[in-house]
Image: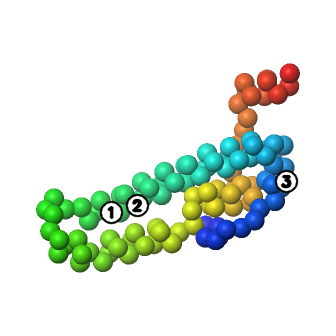
Amino acid sequence: MAASASIITRDTDKIGESTGNLYKSIAVISKRAKQIATDMKEELNGKLSEFASTVDNLEEIFENREQIEISKFYERMPKPTAMAIEEFANDEIYWRMNEAEEATETK
């Protein structure tokens, strides 16, 4: 992903353009960020489970450099919210309104 790891000021008018409502856009971004976070967590847990041992040995815990490197890699990655905002800004997220929401808006 090309999302920035640092804080960026965003134009709220641009965020709200694609849905017609800023709050709907934030809801779409939020749901996508949760999906990304879940995927990242499952991926990290899968990689770290390879290192799981049934014996608690302090020497093994401190000597496991691969596990530390994997954890550091995920810590350096952009946050799921930054990735979701970037995807939303680049029109990479497919979203649609629920039929019940459409009916209440037309009234």
Residue under label 2: 44
- Distance Cα–Cα, label 1 vs label 2: 6 Å
Residue under label 3: 13
First along the sequence among labels 3 and 2: 3
Badge 2 element: helix
Badge 1 element: helix
| Residues at discs 1 and 2 in contact (Cβ within 8 Å) | yes
Q: Residue at x 46, y 67 (%)?
A: 74
Q: Residue at x 35, y 58 (%)?
A: 46
Horizontal arrangement in the rendering, residue 20 relative to residue 41 (left or right): right
How many numbered dots are placed on residues in this image? Answer: 3
Image quadrant assignment for residue 53: bottom left
- Distance Cα–Cα, label 1 vs label 3: 41 Å
Residue under label 1: 48
Residue type pointed to by label 1: Leu
Image quadrant assignment for residue 84: bottom right
Horizontal arrangement in the rendering, residue 89 relative to residue 82 (left or right): right
